[in-house]
Image: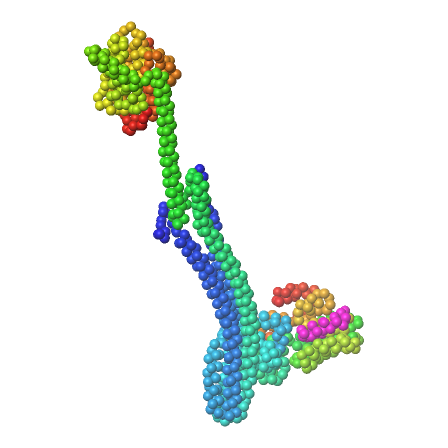
Amino acid sequence: MKSFRHRPVKKYTVHILLTCMIALIAATLFGWGAYLRVLEKGEWDDARGVNQYSRHYVMITDDSSSSLWQSIYRSAAEAAKRQDACLELLGGWSGGNYSLTDYVNIAVASKADGIIVKPDGTARLREAVNEAEKSGIPVITVLEDESDSRRKSFVGLNSYQTGKTYGDQILNCIHDDTKKVTVLLRRGDAGKDIVFKQLKATVQEGLAPDRELAVESYTITEGGSFDAEEAIRGLFHDENTRPDILVCMNETDSKCAYYAMVDYNQVGSVQLIGYYQSDMMVSAVQKGIIPMVITLDAQQVGECCIEALEEYYQMGHVSSYFSVDLNIITAQNAADYLQEGGEDE
Amino acid sequence: MSEHRKNSGKMHFSIRVKLLMTFALTAILMFVINILLYSGINRSMRRLDAVYATNAGLNELSACLEELQEDVFEYLNTKSSDSLEDYYRHVQELRDMVEQLNAYNIDSEMKLLEKDIRNMTDTYLELAEETVQAKRGRNTERYNSMYSMAEQNYEYIQSAVYRLNDMQFRSNSDNYRIMMSSLSYMEIVSSGIVIAAAVINLLILLLLIRTITEPLSMLARSANEVAAGNFDITLADTGKRDEVGVVTHAFVKMVRSIREYIDKTKESMEKEQKMMERELLMETHLKDAQLKYLQAQINPHFLFNSLNAGAQLAMMEDAEKTSIFIERMADFFRYNVRKIEETATLAEELEAVDNYVYILNVRFAGDIHYETNIAPGFDEVRLPSMILQPIVENAVNHGIRNIEREGHIRLTVAPVDGNLRISVRDNGQGMSRERIEEVLSGRARTSGSDSTGIGLDNVMNRLELFFGEKDLFEIESAGRDQGVEVRLTVPLRGSGNAESPGKM
């Protein structure tokens, strides 16, 4: 007898189908959730995790992109946060055409609670600082002082101490063939003259009486944006003006001098005393291309700025000078700074 | 048709409902996926709008500020009331716009810039107001100085707005990029989901179609088998109560009833065949009997006429006994001749035996003591003719003829177990067991010159054929000189007496 039997749908087929459907629904929901997450991620990064502070300080410098100022800003901002304040680094407005004075004016118009500025030595700035003080906004000058203004305090190096430190380091670099030491100065840098005088005095005191050494300053006049670089290259270009020891007191000058020295193949014959612990300079010290880098403690600078402002708000007055330390980076301790720099950047 | 019904706890759906459910499921699935996709795209578009709304807001603020500055300039220049009116209107507008900006010290460059703009605008508005007031008071020196301060402030604000706009644009570009990447991500995910949904739907459809077509093709195969003449098929019930299930069920029922009908027809045909065979056999035996009869080379009619003539003659000569003898002999032979082809009643058979015994007693001077014990009410029972006479003849010839003592033959007719039992018992020589076997198996030739011509085997065969049963004929003997009893069993029900099987 022939038997016809209907093959029923196998149970596992149904199970597989059901599993597929559930998986599909799960995939849909998961995909949807993931999509929403991706979408939310783009939502106002700015407004995420923001904190509200009771005071608003402004930091003004003409060189806000340099690593020195970035370091100072970072440490100051951290210190400000600890003191329930936020710090704004003003700069780069109007295509970079604004002067420091303009920024001080802007800070005043913005009703900031405090201004930290590196003065450029101009009368307009002095007036702007005075104007800010008149509006009840305390002004702290940093690295350069504007002692004639009504600024509340100055955070920076002691010019005499700086001159002596530089002089001492120059003496360490001098050997028998050294005939000429050139110190690069910026025209606008107030107090640089005192630094240079002290430096020269220290060097001359440290030399034997019959030893002849020319210690000269080379002042860069900032007519245009790239004058410093041209001037430094000019120094290396002409053999008569080429020094045996070149001292820089500015981060940009240090870099320019370093590149010029390398380009003119003067490594070994010109000794460069650099300024500020940029990675490039520290690495050059470590490799022995330059003997040393003199740097100030950027973190200390930033913290002192905020400390000065807080002190003013708490006490109603503040000491007019906060001194910061100079550090000397040589081949012996360069590795520490490289590591620190790596952490900082 | 009911949409579905519950059968032993299992839901049964019609194909129509199944199809509807599948399509509805597909549609719902696709609908939900589409809703998700569209809402996702909408969300993205809204976010995209929001991204550039901030820029647009800043541009409006900038434009308003510009107009305000122009109003101040215009007022200073012309001192027109129109410009003053515009000035106040724009001041209000600007204040409203500035209200939207951040006013808190928040640790975010853009938010701080917003706050700067807000405060600078306040300062600007104060300066502008002082300028306007100074102009009203005609304090030329003051309004000139105120205006220049306001103008400087205006520039600062514009510069700040420009910067904020730039920052926001950059941030928005990032947002835009994220959004575009999320959209492309969405595209991939949704494509994947749609494809997966389509595949699963296809599988469900396939499954459903299989549940519909499988029983159908099974039905078609079994129908083909039936068409080819093979009714011996079993068709498993699909267990479903849908349309196909109903058709399958009907088909199974149809095949079953056709098979039953065929079986019945076959059975009746077989029966008919058997009957024909039996008739043929009977005819053969009849022919045999007739042949035997013809061998007797007696012309019955001449014999009967002669006998009748003899009887009349005896009557005329007053030989009454002779007349009766000849008459009974004539009756016996007439019956013999007439009835050989027909069935007879029990009464007719008994009468034939009576005539025969009378004839023999005349011949053998009353040596045969014949007794009967007939149960009443069975006269009309029909049985093949010339059945009892050969048995009695046998009892005479082989039983009591050659014994010294008185020979007795007793014929008994009595109902036993729903049958009619006819017993012919003699007190003659008896039979050995072997002889009985021989006779019953039909190997023994019993006919002799003194016989009426019909042997026991003929009797047995005709009985069997007539009633369609075996073992209706029994012989029993206790041994030598113990006599013999021949027993016939005549079924009262069945073919023999319920209906006549026809001629013999």
Up the image or down, A327 lies above or below B310; here it is: below
Q: How many marks?
A: 0
Q: Position of residue B241 (x, y in %)?
A: 38, 48
Residue found farthest to the left: B318
- Give whichever of A202, B173 is nearer the camera: B173
Where's residue B453, x and y in %? Answer: 34, 16
Residue A325 appears in view: no
Residue at left 30%, top 13%?
B395
* Of A254 and B298, the residue lying toward us: B298
Q: Quadrant of residue A59?
A: bottom right
Visible residue check, residue A229: yes
Q: How is the image coloured?
A: rainbow
Image location (x, y in percent) of residue B227:
44, 42
- Quarter location, residue A334: bottom right
Tell me the residue at 27%/15% (across/down). B306
B354 lies left or right of A340: left
Q: Residue furthest top?
A: B404
- Whole-percent x, y for residue A9 in the image: 45, 47
Name the image quarter holding residue A66.
bottom right
Is residue A280 found left or right of B469 in the rendered image? right
Magenta highlight range = A247-268
